[in-house]
Amino acid sequence: MDYLELADLLLPNVEKTPEYYRTLYPKRNLKPNAMVTRYAPSPTGFQHLGGVFAALISERLAHQSGGIFYFRVEDTDKKREVAGAIEDSTDTLRDFGINFDEGVVDSSTEKGAYGPYKQSDRIEIYHAFVKSLIKKGLAYPCFCTEEDLDKTRKIQQELKINTGYHGKWAIHRNSSLDEIKIELAKGTPYVIRLRAPEESGKRVICNDLIKGTISMPQNDQDIVILKNNGIPTYHFAHAIDDHLMGTTHVIRGEEWLSSVPIHLQLFEMLGFTPPHYAHIPTIMKMDGTSKRKLSKRKDPEISMSFYKSQGYPFLSVTEYLVNLINSDFQEWRYANENEPCTSFKITLENMSKSGALFDILKLNDISKNVIASMDATTVYKLYLDWAKNYDADFAKELIENEEYAKNIFNIERENDKPRKDFVKWLDVKDHIEYFFDDLYKSSLESGLNFPDHIPIKQVEKVLTSYLDVYNYSDDNDTWFATLKKLSLELGYAKNARTYKKNPDLFVGQLSDVATIVRVALTNRTQTQDLHEVMQVMGKKRVIERLGQNF
Ligand code: GLU
């Protein structure tokens, strides 16, 4: 068989050679242990936790080692492509601070010298490598239809042998040039297959950096490398791209582990050095007493849009994911309270082999601390970024009252023990809406929240007397002393113990008086520090609210 003639017959217009591309994309000039990693999603759906987890691990390892992290779009399956999926990936990476050095920036822009970074723009490159494999007799056209392949599979199943296109079942493997020419003349559609080495029983070893050494049977199928529309399969594109882009470490979900024999075979037949592989175990979840994979149907937290809509700060999710990568992160965090979580050095060796457990309570806990450590201006800014999309009316209110809003956010903040009441931005409004007169009024209309054991007559009496002694300029101690003095004068016990001993002697206890003032001002029985709340509300608002008829 004249393979050169066959190659020219099948790909007559392909003139560039693998050498051309090797010169075009020279070896990267990096220091010895620098890692080159990538995130390579297919735009067939929206970003999910597993993808962002893989992207974060890849980005951290590259940047920790002084290497390169790039973003590639693997869009070889046009039928399954979802509109907006590429933008969803780039937006998600940006939001979560997963910065890439090279790759697809948006649907029309790229950066980096190893592109194009979208597989559909690389067809010419793949064809050059397919042509060179054909020239070497390592790839050939196959004219089988789906029906032909189905028929073969059924026979193989009846004979109880390995199904697929291999050995003697690979019927176009040894077609002559004349036979091929006849099919081409008829215009029969064809794919290009790789001629797998015939070495039955051989095994391949993969030294996976997370899973350890794995031995798997060598691939014996003549896999398709170019589909009948001229587009490569994922496997082929992976080998070409990761080679030309200089990827040193392929870090991806464990669902790809079973494809490693095919990938190693491709690298070998193409004459490429294979990258290191690290297959990330799927994130699991406890369901009752057993572990299971997160499910698209049952677990909203699998999708990144969940964190966006709930308003988890991106930093909280990132910190939570870093904590899922390596469990010794927690210890590091205690010792390095003020460092960004990205200063923690992650390692693949310390990753769980069986799959990290997703725990929303842990995320909430981390997120509370993350928000508590922010200053008021940052909270204001990040909250607004979220609220503009998810609560436009309240965002408007906060923009119109910027200083007031920042003062509200500053209550019990920017100190050694900041208050931890926000887990996520969705929680904020509920905690602060009473500061705004319209929302406060509408909450009064839905019902007064004075505790049942305090009759409204008592409320009136306390508020009228309190208005006489209230002084906006009082500091915290004076303010409390005044409240206490008034309580005693009105016949309230100074504390719960005194009250409980002789309840008949008292109208109630000091905390009831504080509650009356608190509910009158906020229509809540629980709020942030009352003195601070009153200072932020301002004298006029406090007097107005205390002086109304309930
Ligand atoms: N495009 C593949 C996916 O979306 C990526 C696999 C890989 O990282 O090699 O799952």
Image (cartoon, helix red, strand yellow):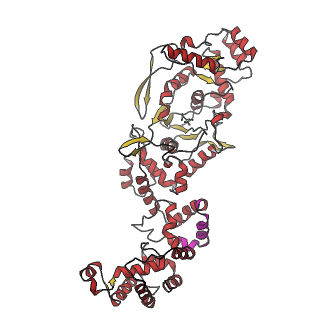
Image point 43% across, 81% down: which residue?
517
Front residue (pair 452, 533)? 452
Is 396 covered by the magenta stretch? yes
Whether residue 345 is visible to the viewer of this picture, yes or no, is: no
Up the image or down, 98 lies above or below 444; here it is above
For the stretch drawn in magenta, what is the main secondary structure?
helix
Whether residue 30 is visible to the viewer of this picture, yes or no, is: yes
How far across and down, in percent of the image, does residue 244 sit? 60, 30
Image point 45% across, 88% down: which residue?
467
Q: In which quadrant is the N terminus drawn?
A: top right
Q: Which residues are magenta?
A: 390-405
Residue farthest along the left direction in this orientation: 501
Ligand 1 location (quadrant): top right
Is residue 245 found left or right of 417 in the rendered image? right
How far across and down, in percent of the image, does residue 36 sit? 53, 37
How far across and down, in percent of the image, does residue 342 sit? 47, 50
Residue farthest along the right direction in this orientation: 185
Count of all numbered marks drawn on residues in the image: 0
Image point 50% across, 85% down: which residue?
549
How far across and down, in percent of the image, does residue 80 sit? 63, 36
Up the image or down, 257 lies above or below 44; here it is above
Front residue (pair 442, 267)? 442
Is 345 covered by the magenta stretch? no
